[in-house]
Image (cartoon, rainbow, N blue to C red):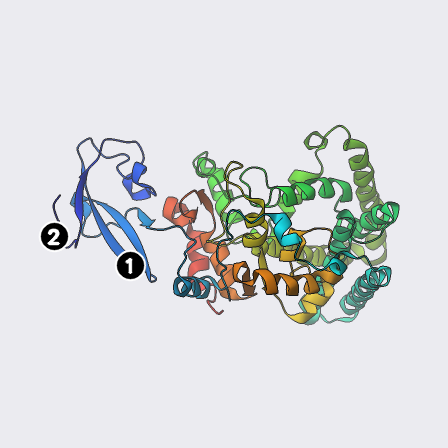
Amino acid sequence: MATASGVSAGSVLQLPSLRVPAKRSLLPRRIAAGAPAGTFFVKRDVVYNRRSYHQFLPWKQRGGLQAAVLPVTSPLVDDEGERKQMAEDYGFTQIGDELPDNITLKDVMDTLPKEVFEINDVKAWTSVLISVTSYALGLFFIAKSPWYLLPLAWAWTGTAVTGFFVIGHDCAHKSFSRNKLVEDVVGTLAFMPLIYPYEPWRFKHDRHHAKTNMLIEDTAWQPVWQKEIESSPFLRKAIVFGYGPIRPWMSIAHWLIWHFDLKKFRPNEVPRVKISLACVFAFMAIGWPLIILKSGLAGWFKFWFMPWMVYHFWMSTFTMVHHTAPHIPFKSSEEWNAAQAQLNGTVHCNYPQWIEILCHDINVHVPHHISPRIPSYNLRAAYDSIKQNWGKYVNEANWNWRLMKTILTRCHVYDKERYYVPFDELVPEESQPIKFLRKFMPDYA
């Protein structure tokens, strides 16, 4: 063992020849990739953002090359002070302890009061009234607003129509009505203005709950695999944009990919899928021409398309924030733990009150993942119980710029040890969109 000039407490490692450039390496087994056999590397310990890292530098470039930077420990840490600092860095108000392996999802569910599972028809239909009224008010606002107030009108109307989705969401989880037919009808009607096929979404969303944050199996979000960004320059650029600047609208791609292909469904699901698709196409064939006939193509853009884009902003943002953070892992089926995925892997995020009202508290998401059978109007009571019994394990945040910046600039490529690797560490020459976000997005928390 020896030390190198300028490297304190370093050691010289002689590694065999591998195949990937050292500057892109992430793990010790890849450090010497692309280097000639017998190449010497320097290992040194550094501290960045109050965390310890190992750095592996080729001997000849030891003075300046920022080679592989490796966290000494898992992104989940045991020290309370480190967790508080991590929470501040990521835009969270709390990062919870890791739930012990011997705690089951049933253990958590058994602590919830029985009344949070009760369906209340008055409250359920009141949520419908709130959504219909707020959406109608939004359309009126769009019709009467001068051009410079249209963004506000679209923001309100798109958020209101997101409430339609949440009502259909309750129907799909059998938490809207005791009558299954009523739920099917209401869910289908609620999704139609969004041109979202209800049954296909229901089938895939059930899998998201059963496999939350499980690699490959979760149908909501998945991290990028390194082989995907190495496949072709065009796909690499598309992925960088998709998981960077346009990620708040990537639910549009998810909607197209997952819900219109009959081959993605089991034979016994296909008849119900076809009914939902017929309803969506009927809305497009009848509703769109009526809008255009009444107000022209500009009216279609104003009254339907822009609120729809706002809806997808919320659809993407809610899903991202609920399950994506540098300290929240995706795990293989062999390592996956249901209780940890649903309690530790789901984030409670507070939004401005008007958004929470119009979206029926969908942001109170932890109890929904403990049991999808909890109606939306009971989520707050259920979360109060979770806080009392399991509060030290939950992740909490207030929606803020730093939180979004963290997700958009850090949570990209899957890595087992680090959970996520940013694009600009792997493909820096093609990560200008990420660098732009890192530089210009506000860092307010």
Q: Which residue is mark 2?
A: 5
Residue 82 spot, x, y in % from top left:
39, 62
- Kindly identify the residue that appears in the image at 30 percent across and 53 percent down: 53
Amino acid of disc 2? Ser
Q: In the rendered view, would you say 232 is above or below 379?
A: above
Q: Nearer the viewer, residue 133 or 84?
A: 84
Residue 376 spot, x, y in % from top left:
73, 59
Asked if disc 2 and disc 1 are in contact, CB closer than 8 Å, the reply is no
Query: What residue occupies the far top of the structure in this picture?
Result: 267
Q: Which residue is mark 1?
A: 47
Q: In the rendered view, would you say 333 is above or below 63?
A: above
Q: Circle 1: is it few (<14), some (14-19), or many (20+) Cα within 10 Å?
A: few
Q: Earlier in the sequence, mark 2 or mark 1?
A: 2
Q: In the rendered view, would you say 415 is above or below 318?
A: above
- Mark nearest the camera among 2 and 1 is 1
- Kindly identify the residue that appears in the image at 72 percent across and 67 percent down: 357
Q: Is residue 41 left or right of residue 424?
A: left
Q: Secondary structure at mark 2?
A: loop
Observer able to see residue 299: yes
- Kindly identify the residue that appears in the image at 68 percent across and 44 percent down: 205
Q: Is residue 70 left or right of residue 195?
A: left
Residue 135 location, quadrant? bottom right
Q: Circle 2: is it few (<14), some (14-19), or many (20+) Cα within 10 Å?
A: few
Residue 224 spot, x, y in % from top left:
49, 42
Residue 129 location, quadrant? bottom right
